[in-house]
């Protein structure tokens, strides 16, 4: 690395300057199983998390919380969560005060995972896309994914997989399908300690 620092993204704060925000590379890529927390705090008033745990950044995927970083910006000390995305290994900074706004949340539990599989295996009452233009349906899918709800994500994926079996998907629909499948498979794999490719194959078999 020649002593260079690794650039990271800084999400959700207007005061961040245009130049990249940088943090030094982590001393260790993760926290060993059973290791005590380096720091612990409450997020969203109800979720107590710690460095080393996995979290979900809606629309981006599963990430490991690497650090709580304090940085002075425009004369003010700001606190950031440093996330290491599990897909692509990029790093993202989220202002601690914006965590609720961006929708950062813990991984789903086993009960939620069971509900996800039930959604995937249940045929919708109405045919996907019925009575709507493709562009309106495409926008609706995008908005449902942006809600951050894992259940909305599962329904979007199911509906698009069903639609794919009935017609040729548009380029936009393919993009939404791929995004929904990646996000859902990644989280289910993390929760159930499985490979994402294995989860994807099971989803394909479940949606008929």
Image (spheres, helix red, strand yellow):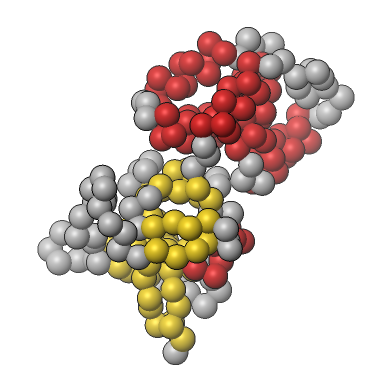
Q: Is residue 195 above or below residue 84?
A: above
Residue pictured at 63% horizontal, 21% vertical: 118
Q: Nearer the viewer, residue 141 or 135?
A: 141
Is residue 85 shown left or right of residue 96?
left
Q: Nearer the viewer, residue 19 or 43?
A: 43
Residue pictured at 54% horizontal, 70% vertical: 97
User: Where is residue 119 drawn, in percent x and y?
Assistant: 65, 23
User: Where is residue 82 drawn, in percent x and y?
Assistant: 38, 61
Extreme residue toward the bottom, this view: 75
Q: Is residue 76 above or below residue 165?
A: below
Residue pictured at 36% horizontal, 26% vertical: 195
**Residue 164 visible, this orientation:** no
User: Where is residue 88 drawn, in percent x and y?
Assistant: 35, 43
Q: Quadrant of the N terminus?
A: bottom left
User: Where is residue 60 drawn, in percent x and y?
Assistant: 50, 46
**Residue 179 visible, this orientation:** yes
When asked about the image quadrant of residue 33, the answer is: top left
Residue pictured at 43% horizontal, 68% vertical: 80
């Amino acid at each position: 690395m020649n002593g260079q620092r690794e650039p990271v993204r800084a999400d959700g704060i207007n005061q961040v300057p245009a130049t990249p925000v940088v943090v030094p590379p982590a001393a260790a890529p993760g926290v060993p199983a059973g290791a005590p927390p380096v720091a612990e705090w409450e997020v969203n008033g109800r979720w107590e998390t710690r460095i080393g745990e996995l979290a979900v950044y809606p629309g981006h995927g599963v990430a490991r919380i690497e650090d709580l970083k304090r940085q002075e910006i425009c004369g003010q000390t700001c606190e950031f969560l440093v996330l290491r995305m599990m897909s692509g290994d990029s790093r993202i900074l989220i202002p601690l005060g914006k965590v609720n706004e961006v929708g950062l949340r813990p991984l789903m539990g086993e009960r939620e995972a069971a509900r996800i599989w039930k959604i995937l295996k249940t045929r919708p009452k109405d045919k996907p896309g019925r009575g709507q233009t493709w562009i309106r349906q495409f926008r609706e899918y995008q908005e449902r994914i942006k809600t951050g709800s894992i259940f909305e994500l599962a329904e979007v994926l199911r509906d698009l997989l069903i639609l794919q079996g009935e017609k040729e998907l548009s380029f936009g629909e393919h993009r939404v399908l791929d995004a929904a499948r990646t996000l859902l498979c990644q989280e289910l794999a993390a929760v159930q300690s499985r490979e994402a490719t294995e989860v994807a194959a099971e989803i394909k078999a479940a949606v008929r």
